[in-house]
Amino acid sequence: MVARGELLDGIRGNGISTFGGNPLATAAGNATLDYVLSHDLQRNAAVTGRLIIDGLQEAATTLDIVGDVRGKGLMFAIDLVDPATKKPSPPLAARMLEATKERGLLVGRGGLYGHTLRMAPPLTLTEAEAKEGLTILTDALTAVNEETKTK
């Protein structure tokens, strides 16, 4: 809440709004924005996100289970499809959750049919961390893709 001193001094009660705008939340918000700007996290998200998305799109060209890779910055998604029908495949998405977890990376799942892997790493992601995550994702995708060929 922002107001002249005499107005704020006139408030009777034990506190003020807990829904943001209070002095503590405002200070935290300002500190966060200062950090984002001073560390150029928007540029970092663009660079590391492009590294991941480009890598996934390149890998997808040889993987029958990938229907689409899309994203912007550090928010991206992979649609998993049945290799034979190209229809959304929630079971392959579920298998990918396990494959990435086995390799040390937790990802989310969503999409209209539950067939989409969704990720949004922190804006502070380093290039080394982005490469490590990309390697885990592509290894897991390759392994799950190979599993579909043996069934």
Image (cartoon, rainbow, N blue to C red):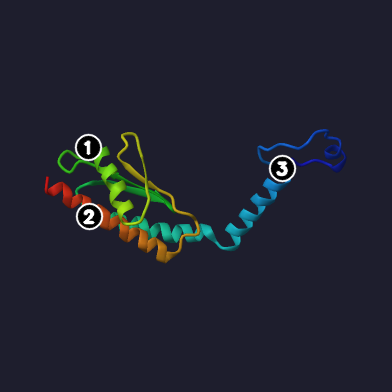
Find disc 1 in the rendering and name its residue.
Answer: 87
Whole-percent x, y for residue 82 in the image: 20, 41
**Residue projecting furthest to the left:** 150
User: Disc 3 marks which amino acid?
Assistant: Asn
User: Disc 1 marks which amino acid?
Assistant: Lys
Are there few (<14), some (14-19), or many (20+) residues within 10 Å of tag 1?
some
Whole-percent x, y for residue 110 in the image: 36, 39
In space, the residues marked 1 and 2 are separated at their CA atoms by 19 Å
Q: Earlier in the sequence, mark 3 or mark 2?
A: 3
SS for callout 3: loop
Whole-percent x, y for residue 94 in the image: 29, 42
In space, the residues marked 1 and 3 are separated at their CA atoms by 49 Å
**Residue projecting furthest to the bottom:** 128
Q: Earlier in the sequence, mark 1 or mark 3?
A: 3
Are there few (<14), some (14-19), or many (20+) residues within 10 Å of tag 3?
some
**Which residue is nearer to you in this view: 131 or 49?**
131
Which numbered disc, 1 or 2, marks the residue closer to the eye?
2
SS for callout 1: loop
Residue at (24, 43) in percent of width and height: 92
**Can the viewer see residue 12 in this picture?**
yes
Which numbered disc, 1 or 3, marks the residue closer to the eye?
3
Find disc 2 in the rendering and name its residue.
Answer: 142
The image's mark for residue 22 is 3
Residue at (41, 66) in percent of width and height: 128
